[in-house]
Image: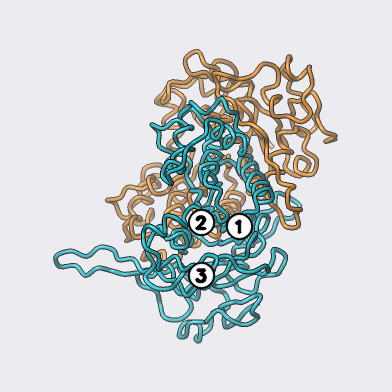
Amino acid sequence: MTALLKLDDISVSIGNLGLLDRISLSVGRGQVVGLVGESGSGKSLTAMAAIGLLPLIGGRVTKGTVRFDGQDMAAMTETQRRKLRGARIGFVTQNPMTALDPVQRIGEQVDVVSRLHLGLSRADARARTLDLLTRLRIPEAGAVVDAWPHQLSGGMKQRIVIAMALAGDPDLIIADEPTTALDVTVQAQIIQILGSLVRERGVALLLITHDMGVVAQVCDRVAVLYAGRLAEEGPVGPIFAAPAHPYTAALIGCIPQDGMAKGSLTGIPGAVPSAAAFPAGCRFHPRCPRASDLCRNTPPMIVHRTAGQVACHHPGEAE
Amino acid sequence: MTAPMVKIDALSKRFQSGGGLFAKPRTMMAVREVTLSIGKGEVLGVVGESGCGKSTLARLVLRLIEPTSGRVTIDGTDITALSAGALRRIRRRMAMVFQDPYSSLDPRYSLADVLAEPLRLQGEVIAPARVDEMLASVGLPAALAASHPHQLSGGQRQRVGIARALALKPDFVVLDEPTASLDVSIQAQIIALLADLRDRLGLTYLFISHDLGLVRYFCDRIVVMYLGSVVEVLPDTRTAPRHPYTRALMDSNFAPDPARRRVIEMLTGEVPSPFALPPGCAFATRCPRASDRCRRDTPALGGDAAHPVACFHPL
């Protein structure tokens, strides 16, 4: 599969502070790639780097390249980048409550995307909106288009935000914790709908989440970030069956599961370090059960395996 | 089950909203006729989605808010009938850990102040070593005593919240979503700490959560709430659910195993507004098994006394 979005060995800084260090990952069409890690591990920053939004927060890519459909994002002008984001990239934010304009009817907010980016007429845009809302399993889509945002529940609003992201027929969708603000039953539905729409339409989806359960349910590949570095990346099957990186294993072990013995959920000791205080060597070593002197002194190299990559001096037997 | 320590009897809370010069106020029942008991040393879980009344229930049980009707007795004492002074004395025995460790700690207080406050309010003299002891009991170094909340991570803050709740050596603790705003890695740490404290101190917990997976891991019995009412009480963590809503909650939990992917049965329909509940079962608007009877009559919690369920068509 040719990658639609390809981050190749990128590092990101804000001021003199290095926040991301040599991250490589790619997302293909019809593929769902999960980006996971605890808060502060660099997930959202990686997404911002991917779509050239770092200048908004005073950040810059200091190394490596970001390619979208083969084009180097750094070689484009800001106008070109903005056009690319508008026409080819959809974005679903974490909080649907603030993503909608409170004084515009739902239908108009979704219509405008396809009118602007696909040049559709009013009537065609509305037909497209109704079709999208129906596919997102919004009951009585015909009535919902005339509703105001405050009349909808959180789950409904998030579906509208997803509809807006899809309306311009984007090639890539970036969803940043799209279900965190929602109730669990609604969360599961949205994840399922998003996953099937992406595959059906051949859209690439980069899904930022902290929930390994969601990753296992919907993603094809997963990139695990820790303190600004890639811990492990690859297809979900082998990674969940036998995680090579102790951090990946620990994240999976944090999810309570049926039949788990009481006391077996221990979590990961300590906390993610701040960027100003990244430890030497492997950044995970202070929290790692396998840490040795080598880990305390030397950062592990990223080792490419048949299907993925891992950065650990003492990886588990994944292959 | 051991002898009940906390008994909740037909507890209800009505809230009023809006109302003005010309507008009529609207009312909703946040908690409706809830009857439960919690055994000594038990961890009772209450699970449900936002708006189901679980946090209101938590506050009612400690009488942080006044019930509209019903009673709460703790070891035989009806706390809903106590005077302010008597309530304060019995409050030593009960405590609460709040959801958000960012807003539940005063930013101007040092940790030593935070932890000494409950003792001070009860008129106790604070021995200098006491704060260090309290910090150590939740796995925090004594060196943190002088720091302020903003210098702490979310997990550390929640540990402080727990230490504060335990300051007066209570035997009953209400935990209101104590891990909902934390990373899963930190959540697991906090749950392990709570389990350890229960074993060491013989605590009784009322654990409120939206996460059925977590509740099934941590609790002895599970109460499922939907729009203010109890719809099912699971006698242990292995029993299969009988209420369609509990089933839906369980199906919404994804196992971290790509080999066990499945298509979940979608709940259609919307959650009705708590201000305008339809007649009959509140879950009927989303329930795959709903019949005309469900839309007309309200099912009562009944059936097996150990595993009651409020449903006309249980699984």
Who is closer to the viewer here, B37 or A299? B37
x then y, percent, for residue A230: 66, 28
Task: Identify the disc placed on residue B294.
Answer: none
Residue depicted at 60% across the width and 57% down the height: B204
Residue depicted at 35% across the width and 72% down the height: B276
- Is residue A131 at all visible to an observer of this figure? no
Q: Are marks 1 and 3 on the same chain?
A: yes
Tell me which chain the residue with mark 2 is part of: A
Tell me which chain the residue with mark 1 is part of: B
Residue named by callout 3: B8
Which tint was used for chain A? orange
Q: CA distance from mark 1 to mark 3?
A: 15 Å
Q: Amino acid at mark 3?
A: Ile
x then y, percent, for residue B93: 52, 55
Q: Amino acid at mark 1?
A: Thr
Q: Residues within 10 Å of mark 1 (few under 14, many from 20)?
A: many
Q: Amino acid at mark 2?
A: Asp
Which tint was used for chain B? cyan
Pick the quarter of the image with the C terminus of chain B: bottom right
Q: CA distance from mark 3 to mark 2?
A: 27 Å
